[in-house]
Image (cartoon, grey):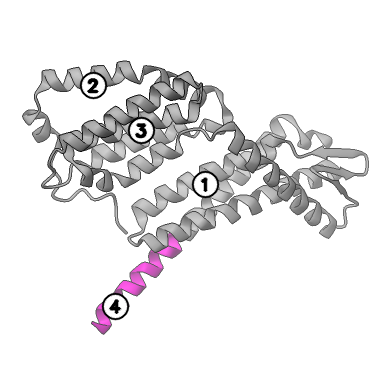
Amino acid sequence: MTVVPALERRSWPELLQRVDLPSALLTLGTFAFLFAKPVALLARDWWNNPDAGHGLLLAPLALWLAWRAGVRPGARPNLVLGLAVLVASVLVRYLSGLAAELFTMRLSLLMGAAGLTICYFGVRQILAWWLPFTLLVLSVPIPDVLLNAIALPLQFTASKMGAALLAARHVPVRLDGNVIEIPGHRLFVAEACSGLRSLTALLSLAVLLGGITLRSWTGRLLLVLLAVPVAIVVNGVRVFLSGFLVYFVSPEFGEGFLHLTEGWLLFIVAFAILGGLAFLASAAERVLSRSRVAYA
């Protein structure tokens, strides 16, 4: 099992002693002024938009991981390339602001952060901090156009799976798009029940688990890919469970607090499944590593 590389890194106290503090503060102040609007909009969406709420966890976690990893040995500033990336990020930020294109505006903030990193520590530091930067990208809310394009197929998939499972349990069911009809009740699989939130969160968790528990990029990519069917299947089970409880127990299970509780419980189940897959992948990597050593 591996953790974010920290051995032989240059400690932050040592680096801070070598930094020209006034110029560093001026740089950070200028950066904060230029990107204040994207930061404010991003924080607002994290707080108010349920589909983007995972950013409240991912962003601080990404900063902590970068701090914990430290700066790679032999890091050298690349002022020319760093300034070029910074200038490009500022241009993207203001052009997207004129076009009122929020997704690109928010990504310009990450471009600017990458430019600052290159200015002070070089391009290879971006690679060393691949996990924090990836988590920051995942914390940016998906554009509405893409969100709608993904949510609708997920709604239909969850509806089909839920209806099939209900039929398998001998519940009379009729499916009309994303509306499930059972005797005396109609269940509408809304956008909030599409599973998009759990899919986004599980993808982020897969990236995080892969980054801290797996060594190979193949294993990490496989874990991320497996997060998709896990999210879809668990959400289909959630729709089935709602219909089953509404039919056999009480209509209250189809709305309100009880319906929300079902979602959270199954979300925890999905997290546990993904954690188990990460554990199995890590064990497989250890076995393969021992085999290579034995045959070397």
* Mark 2 and mark 3: Cα distance apart in space: 14 Å
* Span of residues in magenta: 278-296
Residues under numbered marks 4 and 2 in contact, where contact means CB atoms less than 8 Å apart:
no
Which residue is at the far bottom?
A: 295
Disc 4 residue type (three-letter): Arg
* Mark 1 and mark 2: Cα distance apart in space: 33 Å
Task: Characterize the magenta stretch by its predominant secondary structure.
Answer: helix
* Mark 4 and mark 2: Cα distance apart in space: 48 Å
Labels 4, 3: front one: 3
Residues under numbered marks 4 and 3 in contact, where contact means CB atoms less than 8 Å apart:
no
Q: For the residue labelled by badge 3, is the local secondary structure a helix, a strand or a loop?
A: helix
Q: Which residue is mark 1?
A: 202
**Left or right: where does residue 119 sit relative to residue 270?**
left
Q: x, y (%) of residue 187?
A: 82, 39
Disc 1 residue type (three-letter): Leu
Residue 147 lies, with reference to residue 37, above or below; the image says below
Relative to the observer, which residue lies in front, 105 or 294?
A: 105
Residue at image x 47%, y 57%? Answer: 223
Q: For the residue labelled by badge 1, is the local secondary structure a helix, a strand or a loop?
A: helix
Earlier residue among tags 2 and 3: 2
* Mark 3 and mark 1: Cα distance apart in space: 22 Å
Q: Which residue is mark 4?
A: 292
Q: For the residue labelled by badge 4, is the local secondary structure a helix, a strand or a loop?
A: helix
**Left or right: where does residue 11 sit relative to residue 213?**
left
Q: Which residue is mark 3?
A: 110
Q: Magenta stretch: residue 287 in it?
A: yes
